[in-house]
Image (cartoon, rainbow, N blue to C red):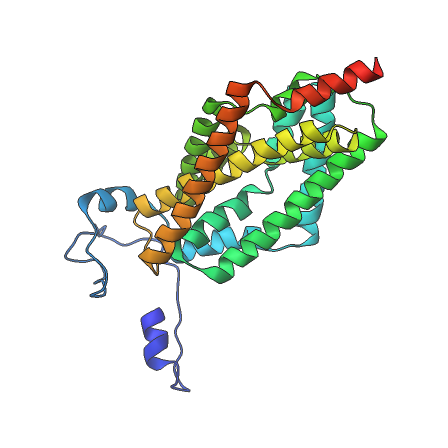
């Protein structure tokens, strides 16, 4: 379609109509002889790329699916706010099922996948849109958590809240695996598989926990919850870009995509170093929590 537009867009009478193809009889199997020819600047796909990209949606379909999640509509604002409220009240009362319900809503997963797709293909417009939507969602989740922390009495040692301030090496491995699984689910159009990813790598609960602790006067614990969110976000993007490339998604500029990937990897390395320092030195947000409890008790 891009080639047709480039060749005939200037012709006033040119019109292209695209119809959905439901079935072909007999079935046509894609092979190197029948596939669309590549431009001379692109290397032919390897057998491994053919294997992993054969059940992937086209790039245009991926754009359409992810772009729907990047618009800041009233429904998005309400979804993020309600998800944060559900997560916050569930963590406060220690109700795991309620927190899982907030995870399934997962309004921030779409912008995160959009950020990984934009980095892979080098689309700055899509990247800016994803960053803006993600920033608005993060701000809403933190604000909702702060309101809960101010108006509701919380126990900072509630396990569901406390777990959002702890980052272990296993959490990094989990977030990387979930980022790859999320891209695979998106690229196959498997909405049911995304539910498991939403539950496994949570973005809204740590943001809400950060707001709750901050609103309750525990900024150190809130910073630790933000650290967990940052680790999850970076890991999802690192694994997402790698998986998109592994599936044969063609970047516009390998230099640009490689540079963006290196930035994410360096950021992940920095976060891992900070995590290792906290573990080795035994320093963390819970010193501030225990200090608060001692002063108040």
Taking the image as shown, residue 200 lies to the left or right of residue 55, namely right
Residue at horizontal 57 percent and vertical 31 percent from the top: 228
Residue 215: image location, x then y, percent: 78, 33
Q: Nearer the viewer, residue 65 or 282?
A: 282
Residue at horizontal 19 percent and vertical 47 percent from the top: 46
Can residue 46 be seen?
Answer: yes
- Which corner quadrant holds the N terminus? bottom left
Q: Residue at the left extreme?
A: 33
Residue 214: image location, x then y, percent: 74, 33
Q: Residue at the front extreme?
A: 281
In the displayed structure, 248 sits above or below 9; it is above
Taking the image as shown, residue 136 lies to the left or right of residue 251, namely right
Residue 224: image location, x then y, percent: 62, 29
Can residue 235 be seen?
Answer: no
Residue at horizontal 48 percent and vertical 46 percent from the top: 113
Taking the image as shown, residue 167 lies to the left or right of residue 207, namely left
């Amino acid at each position: 379609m891009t080639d047709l537009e480039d060749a005939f867009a200037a012709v006033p009478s040119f019109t292209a109509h695209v119809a959905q193809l439901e079935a072909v009889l007999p079935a046509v199997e894609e092979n190197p002889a029948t596939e669309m020819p590549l431009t001379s600047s692109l290397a032919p796909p390897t057998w491994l790329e053919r294997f992993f990209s054969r059940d992937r949606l086209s790039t245009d379909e991926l754009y359409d699916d992810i772009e729907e999640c990047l618009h800041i509509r009233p429904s998005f604002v309400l979804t993020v706010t309600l998800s944060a409220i559900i997560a916050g009240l569930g963590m406060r009362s220690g109700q795991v099922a309620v927190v899982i319900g907030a995870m399934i809503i997962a309004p921030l997963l779409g912008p995160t996948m959009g950020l990984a797709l934009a980095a892979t293909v080098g689309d700055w417009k899509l990247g800016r849109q994803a960053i803006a939507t993600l920033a608005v969602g993060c701000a809403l989740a933190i604000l909702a958590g702060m309101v809960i922390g101010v108006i509701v009495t919380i126990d900072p040692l509630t396990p569901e809240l406390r777990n959002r301030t702890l980052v272990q090496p296993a959490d990094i491995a989990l977030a990387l695996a979930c980022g790859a699984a999320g891209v695979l689910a998106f690229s196959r159009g498997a909405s049911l598989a995304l539910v498991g990813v939403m539950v496994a790598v949570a973005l809204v609960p740590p943001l809400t926990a950060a707001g709750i602790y901050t609103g309750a006067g525990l900024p150190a614990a809130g910073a630790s919850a933000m650290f967990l969110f940052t680790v999850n976000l970076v890991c999802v993007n690192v694994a997402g870009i790698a998986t998109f490339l592994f599936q044969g998604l063609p970047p516009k500029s390998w230099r640009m995509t490689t540079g963006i990937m290196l930035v994410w990897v360096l950021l992940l390395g920095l976060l891992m170093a900070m995590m290792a320092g906290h573990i080795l030195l035994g320093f963390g947000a819970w010193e501030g929590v225990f200090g608060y409890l001692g002063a108040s008790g």
